[in-house]
Image (cartoon, rainbow, N blue to C red):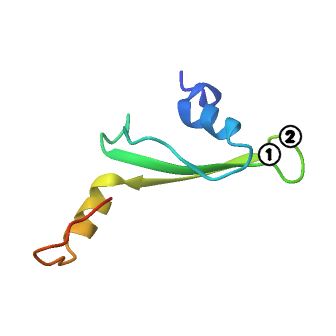
Amino acid sequence: PYIASQRPWYVESMRSEGKIIWTSPFVSRDIQYLLGTAQSVALPGTTQFVGACLAQVSVSKIQDAVAAVPAGQRAFYLV
């Protein structure tokens, strides 16, 4: 069974003390895309967990968007 509190993103979020953190890139279990996640937990003025906010970003989509921008002969991209 899927238990959110045992997933790496949840454990990392709980350790972040309310700061926004990025996960290492990973392959999505469901859609098989390379993703990164920006995440934070809600700890409004306390250490009590209230909720989490996550935004998953497709690494492939970022690469495609950056590659579409002309860089010239002496430039390079860093993502």
Q: CA distance from mark 1 to mark 2?
A: 6 Å
Label 1 crowd bin: few (<14), some (14–19), many (20+), radius 10 Å: few
Labels in figure, total: 2
Q: Nearer the viewer, residue 52 or 1?
A: 52
Is 64 positioned to the left or the right of 30 in the image? left
Secondary structure under tag 2 reads: loop
Q: Residue at (22%, 76%) from the top-left corner?
A: 69
Going by the image, does 3 lie left or right of 61?
right
Report which quarter residue 65 is drawn in.
bottom left
Residue 56 falls left or right of residue 16: left
Residue 19: percent from left, percent from top: 68, 51
Residue 28, x across and y down, in percent: 37, 39
In front of the other: 19 or 71: 71
Residue type, numbered disc 2? Gln
Residue 9 lies in quadrant? top right
Image height of 30 relative to 75, above or below = above
Image disc number at residue 68: none
Residue on which the image places disc 1? 50
Q: Are marks 1 and 2 in contact (CB under 8 Å)?
A: yes
What percent of the width, then of the height, locates residue 60? 27, 54
> Badge 2 is on which residue?
48
**Which residue lies most toward the left here?**
73
**Residue shown at the point (33%, 42%) measured from the top left:** 31
**Res 47 quadrant in image:** top right
Judged left or right of residue 51, residue 74 is left
- Near mark 2 (Cα within 10 A), the count class, few <14, some 14-19 or many ≥20, is few
